[in-house]
Image: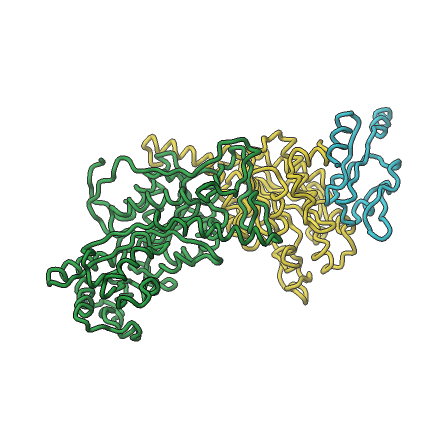
Amino acid sequence: MSKARLMQGNEALVEGAIAAGVRFFAGYPITPATEISELMAQRLPRVGGRFIQMEDEMGSMAAIIGAAVAGAKAMTASSGPGISLKQENIGFAVMAEIPCVVVDVMRGGPSTGLATLPAQMDVMQARWGPHGDHPAIALAPWSVAECFDVAVRAVNLAERFRTPVTILSDAEIAHMREVFAPPDTVEIVDRVRPTGPRSEYVPYRPDERGIPAMADFGSGYRWHPDSNVHDEHGVPAATNHVVADRLVRRLVSKVTDHVDEITQVAEEWLDDAEVVVFAFGSVARSASEAVDVARAEGIRAGLLRPISIWPFPDAVVDRVAARAKAILVAEANLGQLLGEVQRVNAGRATVAHFSRIDGLLPRPEQILARIRELASGALTPPSAPLSRQAGEGPGVRASQGASPC
Amino acid sequence: MPEATRVRKKRQVRIVYTQSWCKGCGICVGMCPARVYAAEEGTGKAIVAAPELCTDCGLCELWCPDYAISLERDSPEHDAAGSEAAR
Amino acid sequence: MLSTAELLKKYYLRDNLPHIWCPGCGIGPIAAALLRAIDEVGLDPDRVSQVNGIGCSGRVGVYVDMDVLKGTHGRALAFATGIKLYRPEQTVIAIMGDGDCGAIGGNHLIHAARRNVDVKAIVINNSIYGMTGGQVSPTTPFGGRASTAPYGSPERPFDLCKLAEGAGATFVARGTVYHIRQLQRLFRRALEHKGFAFVEVISQCPVYYGRYSGAANPAEMLRAQRDGAVTVAAAAKMTPDELEGKLVVGELVNKQEPEFVSEYLKLIQRSQAGETR
């Protein structure tokens, strides 16, 4: 194992990506993701990889797709405004089944928002950003070490499922520093490439896993990744309605049929928990502390922390909904995973919401206060106007020099 | 020198025309310097009306938007490839 | 030079023919000229990576037996840059229309030219957005009519070759469908050029641009290409007034400068030797 050292989240993510085999990165400067570009610019050439800062976010997404089609494990990184710009090309990667990783280091939005401060407002965008019907895979780290692990897993999942994978980091995780020793080796998954003669290669015919083998450009298979709905040979199929139906369904089901394989969660104190906090990323750091203190007070609190955000871990949430009294969804947004939890819960447990959107980390005591309310039965109805929900913090009104809360 | 010019103009050229691909754009009809092509009544598609007038300038083949014209020249290999590909 | 039959056999996906381009469209002949140039240069088709844009011009790859990435509108040169940077041994050719390259793709055009990345940019310029039914494009002439310029365009058009040159392109050429043999030569020169190679091809869209501009038929549009063209040599002796409304055809720029991917490969060596500059 390499020597442990103080490392930034963005740096650990870069190390994980390179360990997993990423050898092409295209980016564009944007806070709080810029360090990823800078580190890739330094690190990639030293391992024979390629870095390019493209002229805009659409260009960097296109460049990684081009490189991926040429055989590279490829990555780009941005934040809200840049991720918005990338959506069309992300959708292309979905349609043409191009493996690649998109890192979204989330910051306050909407629009230019709070450029330097964390938020979790891009969750639904990570699911539904590109137009059209499509699946999504998104992973969210909560620590420097997990930035490394999630980067490795994201690259592997992209190769496995031939689809873009999003990493949902945030300004806090990206810039925090923790002691971390990167492992010397990691599990590596490579896309399946065809091995037979050219005449037998059907580029979009799924194999037994539901995923077609993918040839590198220049390896002699001569195939056509196409943004149009296409048949199994990659020929646009505008008037073939059977093909159109079949293709889009397969693009979705190749991911949704394997939710169990993709699902990754962390649990704390869940076995007998009555009040379960559902949180991810930097918010989960505070939630974890809140749950620990609640336990010390005798409250049967627990933490369910999704690392895979999409596909949503229905099965795990379902088990919790069946047993818990209450689920507190804590997010740095006004309610994006809330609806998912409510959907799976289907009216069983009480579902409450905690949100903080002022760019500051929720404090553990804010989440603890809600846990106590839920444990004692004094509930804030989920339908209460959002502006009056507990937990906004004093930052909502203060415009500068917000008092520490 | 005049001898070489005469030899070149006398080179055998066969116009292999696939009418099913023709969309009747009229380029060969309008542009052939030797007036080899004419437009068919009704369909407007080209017909090779006077192949004997062809001077092998080669432009109809290069200009045809639909790849409907292939010019096969001289050698037996050319003829074979042409008749096979035209099917 | 290969006959059409030989060309079809060697380079085309026969099952996908006949193609969908309109009667009289210039794209078919342009594609054939490019493939003849590839054949002339002796490129192994496996060593060619094609990128197509969106639109009629972006349909070339459907018919061609090569690796072809048909990506999103305007981004062909960005996809191409990624392919070339990762696999420098490929000859990367991007085929775009005037809208794909000059409108939405304009930023990628100027940066690919600035970088001098060894990609061949072929722009089929028919001065209209054909696939979507005839809208005005950045190369529609001032006053020209189109479906979104029903009173005549109030905008000046681009000279795409000047744009490419201004952005630093090291090879710039203009051809026309009429001058089809010269076009094939220009394609060959572009393929042989080490650096960003930009070839604009003046083409005819009889069904939309032709009707909007009052052209009677495709043959007339070819004749207009002939009549509107002047060679580089002739243009050098003409006054700006005489050049008004004319298009200079031939090789306009051809110079050698450090090529981006080659420079990056040198950078890799420097970084591995521990150097920082």
Q: Quadrant of the N terminus of chain A?
A: top left
Q: Decide which of A380, C261 is in the foreground and name it.
A: A380
Picture coordinates of residue C202, whole percent (x, y) = 68, 48
Q: Which quadrant holds residue C153?
A: bottom right
Picture coordinates of residue C123, whole percent (x, y) = 61, 47
Shown colour of chain B = cyan
**Do we see residue C248 in this rendering?**
no
Q: Is residue A174 left or right of residue A372?
A: right
Picture coordinates of residue A192, whole percent (x, y) = 44, 37
Point 52% across, 43% down: residue: A204
Q: Is residue C153 left or right of residue A288?
A: right
Point 66% across, 33% down: residue: C10
Q: How is this picture coloured?
A: by chain
Q: Is residue A58 above or below residue A205?
A: below
Q: Is residue A218 left or right of residue A166?
A: right
Point 78% across, 25% down: residue: B75
Q: Quadrant of the C terminus of chain A?
A: bottom left
Total marks placed? 0
Q: Decide which of A11, A238 is in the foreground and name it.
A: A238
Point 50% across, 40% down: residue: C117
Picture coordinates of residue A316, whole percent (x, y) = 29, 55
**Do we see residue A177 in this rendering?**
yes
Instruction: Give the letter of the yellow chain.
Output: C
Q: Is residue C238 left or right of residue A102?
A: right
Shown colour of chain A = green
Q: Is residue A197 above or below residue C179?
A: above
Q: Residue furthest left?
A: A297
